[in-house]
Amino acid sequence: MLDDAPHGSHARRPPCGTLRRVTLPTALPTWAPFVPLAAWLWLLLGHGRYWHTGTRLPRRSAPPRWPDVAVVVPARDEAAVLPDSLPSLLGQRYPGHAEVFLVDDGSRDGTGELARALADARPGGLPLTVVPAGPPEPGWTGKLWAVRQGLAAARSRTGAEYVLLTDADIAHAPASLRDLVSAACAGGYDLVSLMARLRVAGRWERLLVPAFVYFFAKLYPFRRVNRPQARTAAAAGGCVLLSVAAAERAQVPESIRGALIDDVSLARAVKRSGSGRVWLGLADGVRSVRPYAGLPELWRMVTRSAYAQLRYSPPLLAGTVAGLAVLYLLPPAAALTGSVAGAAAWAVMTATYVPMLRYYRQPVWTAVTLPLTAALYLAMTVDSAVRHHRGRGAAWKGRTYR
C-alpha cells in the first residue's frame, strides 16, 4: 500500500494510541461577562434604587381647606371595563367639591350611555358630565384631544384648583382622591401620580406585566423623579393629579398635543415650567381592571409606543438592542458555559427583580426568567420600529399615528 502523505510527515504524527488535544475557539472573550456584571452592580447601587418598591403615597394630614377637583376621564370604546371603574370614581369620599367629566371620544359601543346609566344607578355620588369629544384636530393624539375637551368643560362648570386625569380602566379606592389631594397640598406638589397596580391573572400577564413596571422604573427611577433638582421627570398616565395653575404655566395639553407617551411628556412639561414639583410612586389603592387575554394584546400595548420612546431613532434602537442583549441575555448564556462572572451578573439581575415580583404577589423564583421576558420586550421594540417604518405607526382603537 502506497503512502501518499508528504515526505517526512510520518515523523510528525503522534504515537499510536495518543489523542491530539484540540482547542476550540471560544464564542466570547473571557472578559465579556464582566461587562454586564459591572453594569448590574452599578444599577443595583448607583441608579436611584430603581428596584425598590417602597415609594408609596405619603400619608398626610388634611389641608386647612379642601380644594375643588375636576376628574377627567378620556374614554373610547370602554363599555367593557366601565362598570368596574366608573362607580369607584363616583363613590369617592372626598370632603371638598369634586365632579367627574367623562369624555366620550367617538365611542361606538355605547360608552357615553353606559356612563350615564351607571351614574343614575348611584344617586348621591359625585356629579357626572359626559362630554362628546369630536374628532381630534390635526397634530393631536386622540387621548390628549379628549383631555383638552374635558378640561374645557371643567373650566366652564367649576373653579377647580386640581384636575385628576385618570383612564377609563382604572379603579380607585374610596379614599384615593382625598389621599392624592392631601399629598399634593402638604408636599407642595404640582403633579402627583400613581403607577396603578396592573392586572396580573393570566400566564402572559404574570410573565410580562411586573417586568413592564420594572423596566419603567428603571428608565425613570422614582426617587430621581421626586427630587426637584433632578432632570428626570415621569408620570403614570392612569392616575395623575395636576394643579390647574401648573397646567396653565406648562400650557398643557397644547404643548404636548402630539405626544404618544403623554404621561412622561406631561411630567416633563410641568417640571420644566418654572419650579414645577413632581411626585411619582407605586399605588396601593389604584388598580387597572383591563384584562389582557394573551400575548397579542400585550404585544400591541408595548409596540404602540416602544419606538416613540426611542424618538424614532435607528441609532438609539441599535444601541437599545445591543444594551438589552448585553445586560439580560449575555449573563445567562455565559453562566451556562461555566462563567462565574456570568452567573454573578445573572444573580444580581435576579435580585433586583424580586421586590417587583413581591409587590405583584408573584412567586419569587420566577425572577430567574427575567432574561426570557427581556428577550420578548426586545422583540417587541424591534417590531415597533418595523411597524413605524412600514407606515403603520402607533395604532390604538382604530387610529394610527405616523
Image (cartoon, grey):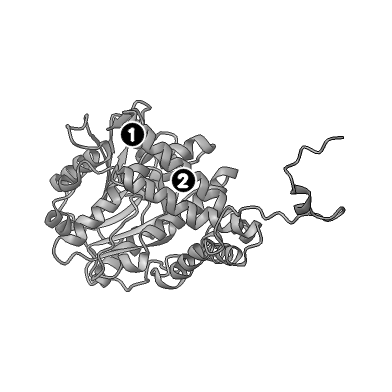
Which residue reaches farthest front? 7
What x and y, as percent, mark residue 82?
41, 39
What x and y, as percent, mark residue 348?
55, 67
Residue count near mark 1 (Cα–Cα under 10 Å), binned few <14, some 14–19, many ≥20 = many
- Tell me if residue 305 comes above or below residue 48 in the rendering: above
Q: Which mark is residue 180?
A: none
Q: Nearer the viewer, residue 330 or 387?
A: 330
Q: Nearer the viewer, residue 7 or 212?
A: 7
Q: Is residue 268 left or right of residue 317?
A: left
Residue at coordinates 24% horizontally, 52% vertically from top-left?
266
> The N terminus appears in which quarter of the rendering?
top right
For disc 2, the marked residue is 378
> The C terminus appears in which quarter of the rendering?
top left
- Tell me if residue 201 comes above or below residue 55 in the rendering: above
What x and y, as percent, mark residue 369?
59, 53
- Tell me if residue 184 comes above or below residue 379 in the rendering: below
Q: Is residue 195 left or right of residue 22?
A: left
Residue at coordinates 14% horizontally, 59% vertically from top-left?
245
Residue type marked 2: Leu
For disc 1, the marked residue is 388
